Amino acid sequence: MASSKIQSVAVYCGSSSGTKPEFELAARELGKHFADNNIQLIYGGAKVGLMGHIANEVLIHNGKAIGVLPTFLAAKEVAHDALTEMHMVDNMHERKAMMHELSDAFVALPGGYGTFEELFEMITWGQLGLHKKPIAILNVLGYYDALAAQMKNMVEYGFLKQDAHDMVLVATSVTDLMRQISGYHAMQGHKWISDLEQT
Ligand code: AMP
C-alpha cells in the first residue's frame, strides 16, 4: 500500500499514561506526525492517559482527531470535549467495528488489557483475511518485547504461521513505524486456506 493511501490511522493505547515519560512523549510524537502529514487520528475518544495525549497533540497542531466512544464509557473514560468529530456508539463491538471501518491502518502504543484486546482483534481479523490493512506496534522502551517473544513462541510451538506472525509490524520509532506501514504488503491467503493446503 502506498503511503499516499494512508489517510486515517486507528491508534490503540492506554487510558493510563504508564510510569515512564517516554510513553507520553511517543504518543505526542505520533500525534504531531499525523497532524503534520494530514493523517486523521481515529481513537477511543477519551481525554485520559495516552489516549488524551495523542489526541491533544493532533489538535494542537491543527490535525484531525476522531473519537469513537461507547455511551456507557463516556463518564468513566472522560470523553474528550474538543475533538474534530466524536461518534457515540452503543457498545464495544460497535466501537471496534467503526474504528476499523474509518481506518487505513492500526497502531498499538503501550497500553493495558483494552489496548491488547483491540490490537488482537485487528490481528485476528487480518489473519482470517477479513481485512488487509497494516497493523503495527510501536515498541516504546521495549514495552512489547515480552509480547514479541510470546508471538515467536506461538510459531515455534506450531500455533501460529510464520506469515501471520510477520503480518504484525514492530517498530521502535515513529519514523520506522510509518515507513513500515507505508511499505506494507498484505499476506497472501489466510489461516484457513493455508491449513487446507497442508492437508
Ligand atoms: P487500556 O489499555 O486497558 O487502558 O484501555 C484502552 C482502551 O481500550 C480504552 O478506551 C478501553 O475502553 C478500551 N477497551 C477495553 N476493553 C475493550 C474491549 N473489550 N473492546 C474494545 N475496547 C476496549
Image: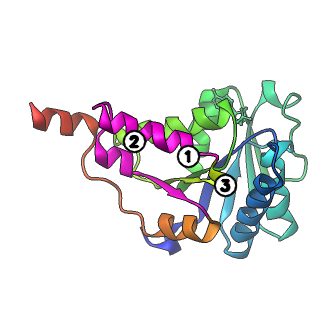
Instruction: Identify the residue at horizontal 68%, vertical 72% (top origin).
Output: 38
Residue 60 quadrant: bottom right
The reply to whether residue 84 is visible in this rendering is no
Residue 138 lies left or right of residue 130; in this view the side is right
Q: Is residue 143 left or right of residue 104?
A: right
Q: Which residue is mark 1?
A: 145
The image quarter containing residue 24 is bottom right
Residue 23 appears in view: yes
Q: Which residues are magenta?
A: 143-172
Secondary structure under the numbered disc 1 in the rendered image: helix
SS at mark 3? helix
Q: Is 197 placed left or right of 65 in the picture?
A: left
Dot 3, crowdedness within 10 Å: few (<14), some or many (≥20)?
Answer: many
Q: Give the mark nearer the N terminus: 3 vs 2.
A: 3
Quadrant the C terminus occupies:
top left
| Residue at 83% over, 62% down | 57
Ligand 1 quarter of the rendering: top right
Mark 2 crowdedness (10 Å alpha carbons): few <14, some 14-19, many ≥20: some
User: Which label is found at residue 30?
Assistant: none
Q: CA distance from mark 3 to mark 2?
A: 19 Å
Horizontal and vertical percent position of residue 158: 27, 32
Q: Amino acid at mark 1?
A: Asp
In depth, the one of 38 and 145 nearer the eye is: 145
Mark 1: give few (<14), some (14-19) or many (20+) Cα within 10 Å: few
Q: Are marks 3 and 2 in contact (CB under 8 Å)?
A: no
Based on the picture, tell me whether residue 110 belongs to the magenta stretch: no
Residue matched to label 2: 152
Q: Earlier in the sequence, mark 1 or mark 2?
A: 1
Q: CA distance from mark 1 to mark 2?
A: 11 Å
Q: How far apart are labels 1 and 3 at the CA level? A: 9 Å
Q: Amino acid at mark 2?
A: Lys
